[in-house]
Image (cartoon, helix red, strand yellow):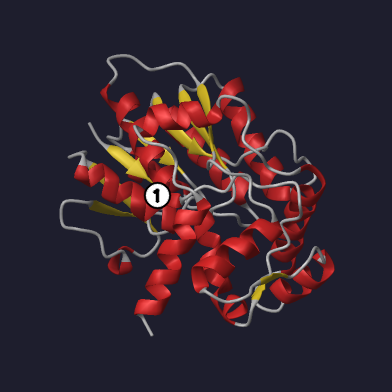
Amino acid sequence: MSILVTGSTGTIGRHVVSGLVARHATVHALTRKPDQAGFPENVRVVAGDMLDVASMRAALQGIDTLFLLNAVVADEVTQALITLNLAREANIQRIVYFSVQHSDRFTDVPHFTGKYTVERAIEQLNLPATVLRPSYFMQNDTRLKDALQHGIYPMPLGELGVSMIDVRDIAEVAVSSLLRREQASTPLPREVIELVGPDAITGNDAAAIWSAALGKPISYGGDDLLAFEANMASHAPAWSAYDIRLMLARFQSDGMRASPGSLDTMTGVLGHAPRSYRDFVVEMAAAWNAAR
């Protein structure tokens, strides 16, 4: 029995690989650059690219379970659908797909609708799969260190609240889902699991939490999406900056809060309550102080 992890060298993928290794699973890690992967010897590193059909066919041979995570890129849907169809041709009956919370609701946000398109393909192709729908990652805010040091929380989350989740909790649920499918005697029914944290965090909430953890005043930078897009476009592709701006606009207009029952489901799968944003911030502040 073997599990192929795509997106293996990213933040989530590395946590998933480590979690599977700790549970003594046979792990194949897909990467474009095997020589730079840096995985333990007991992980089989596989060269592959989701747009290279021959390499994906080879990577899927002998695989029982697939963790399908592909990056938010312009051709994300093409990558995912090619991989899903190749997995179906290889008769892989155990799949965990990495989507996003509110993929079915935020239809004006390109990467949300892209992921929902893949979800619909999973359903219409009758593929046995767990669909994971994570909220905004807490760890995204580690990139805000410079702004926070200048007294500003700059992410324009708005005032309705986002049920942020720690990537470690995401990985734990992914590992549990993969192993449950891997170890089942027959393919399990399709399911959707929403991955959320215990608190709906607003822009002002985040600023206050960072202020307490850093021991200095932190102000919320406000809801100016045009300024956010312009800043992001200075170091990322323009399409990506606009995509994220559209996502943040939905945070501001609709919020991204946990659905009823989702926290209970999370706690049941994890065996513990999901980590809080406050605990994450305290941990990061301590690490930054220790590194001075």
Q: Quadrant of the C terminus?
A: bottom left
Q: Is residue 113 above or below residue 241?
A: above
- Disc 1 target residue: 168
Q: Position of residue 208 (x, y in %)?
A: 62, 63
- Note whether residue 90 is visible: no
* Foreground of the two, 222 or 35: 222
Please tell me which residue is depicted at 71% across the width and 79% down the height of the picture.
234
In the rendered structure, the answer to whether residue 86 lies left or right of residue 78 reads: left
Residue 109 on image: x %, y %: 75, 48
Q: Quadrant of residue 173?
A: top left
Horizontal relation, residue 141 to residue 153: left or right:
left
x%, y% of residue 275?
44, 46
Please say if 261 is above or below 20.
above
Residue at the image position 46 percent from the left and 32 percent from the top: 266
- Nearer-the-camera pick, 228 or 75: 228
Which amino acid is tagged 1?
Answer: Arg
**Image quarter for residue 171?**
top left
The relative height of residue 214 versus residue 223 in the rendered view (above or below) is below
Depth check, front residue: 34 or 102: 102
* Vertical placement of residue 286 versus 136, above or below: below
Could you classify mark 1 by the number of other residues whose Cα lies within 10 Å: few (under 14), some (14-19), or many (20 or more)? some
| Residue 220 makes an appearance in the image | yes
Residue at image point 67% right, 49% down: 111
